[in-house]
Image (cartoon, rainbow, N blue to C red):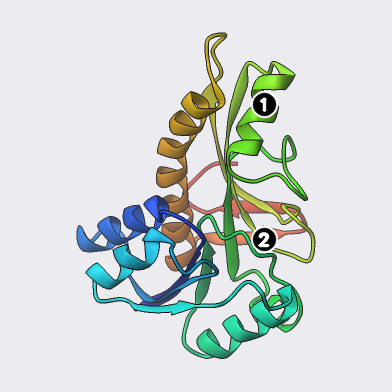
């Protein structure tokens, strides 16, 4: 069975959607562990409620120490690392050992509203401020940059004139759940091919 680790920092709604997709046999995967850089992240409770091994890594460590600790926990135990709202930046050896085996969900259509400092509600505030008519979300592979890895799937959502950042965030989050699970499914079934910056999915004409 395809094994994954899920990294979180907050409520874990994307984690819950992955758990639900496994429970209904849509994903032929197992979540080996959930790792959080916040002790009070509700996603840890979601994991415990589903008998999934959990770990908390204190963010007072340097980012590199966080990355090294994660590698110690998962090395040799998982096939894919899924960043589902994880706020710490991965760097160092984990990126080399898990090259093209780490994915992240970002709440915008990369390359718009991404990069350093762009996370959570801040992304949607910038989208509203800029006046874009379309926003969305992106699942991409993680590399040495911030939100710079090859794009796997994107989903657009409309931005309305009466939107607040919170309303847009809720609309985007619904699509985040769907495309994150789809990306995991494609990868677990061996349907992904990376050619330079382009990601080809064998079941989709692209």
Q: Secondary structure at mark 2?
A: strand
Up-down relation of residue 28 to residue 141 (above or below): below
Q: How many marks?
A: 2
* Quadrant of the snapshot with the C terminus: top right
Residue at x 64% of width, y 46% of height: 119
**Frontmost residue, 78 versus 83:** 83
Can the viewer see residue 74 in this picture? yes
- Does residue 100 appear left or right of residue 180 in this picture? right
Picture coordinates of residue 188, whole percent (x, y): 44, 67
Label 2 – label 1 distance at C-alpha: 29 Å
Which residue is disc 2 drawn over? 194
Residue at x 66% of width, y 74% of height: 60
Which residue is disc 1 drawn over? 127
Up-down relation of residue 64 to residue 140 (above or below): below
Residue 58: quarter of image? bottom right
- Does residue 100 appear left or right of residue 34 in this picture? right
Picture coordinates of residue 46, whole percent (x, y): 30, 63
- Disc 2 residue crowd, few under 14, some 14–19, many 20+, Cα 10 Å: some
């Amino acid at each position: 069975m395809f094994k994954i680790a899920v990294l979180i920092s907050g409520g874990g709604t994307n984690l819950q959607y992955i758990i639900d997709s496994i429970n209904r046999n849509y994903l032929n995967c197992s979540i080996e562990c959930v790792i959080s850089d916040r002790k009070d992240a509700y996603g840890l409770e979601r994991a415990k409620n589903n008998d999934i091994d959990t770990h908390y890594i204190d963010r007072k460590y340097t980012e590199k120490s966080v990355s090294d600790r994660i590698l110690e926990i998962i090395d040799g135990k998982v096939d894919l690392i899924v960043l589902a709202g994880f706020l710490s930046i991965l760097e160092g050896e984990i990126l080399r050992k898990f090259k093209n085996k780490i994915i992240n969900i970002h709440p915008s259509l990369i390359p718009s509203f991404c990069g350093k400092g762009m996370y959570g509600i801040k992304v949607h505030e910038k989208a509203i401020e800029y006046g874009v008519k379309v926003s969305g979300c992106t699942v991409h592979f993680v590399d040495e940059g911030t939100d710079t890895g090859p794009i796997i799937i994107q989903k657009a959502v409309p931005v309305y004139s009466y939107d607040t950042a919170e309303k847009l965030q809720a609309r985007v989050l619904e699509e985040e759940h769907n495309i994150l699970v789809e990306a995991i499914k494609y990868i677990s079934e061996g349907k992904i091919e990376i050619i330079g910056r382009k990601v080809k999915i064998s079941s989709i004409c692209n």
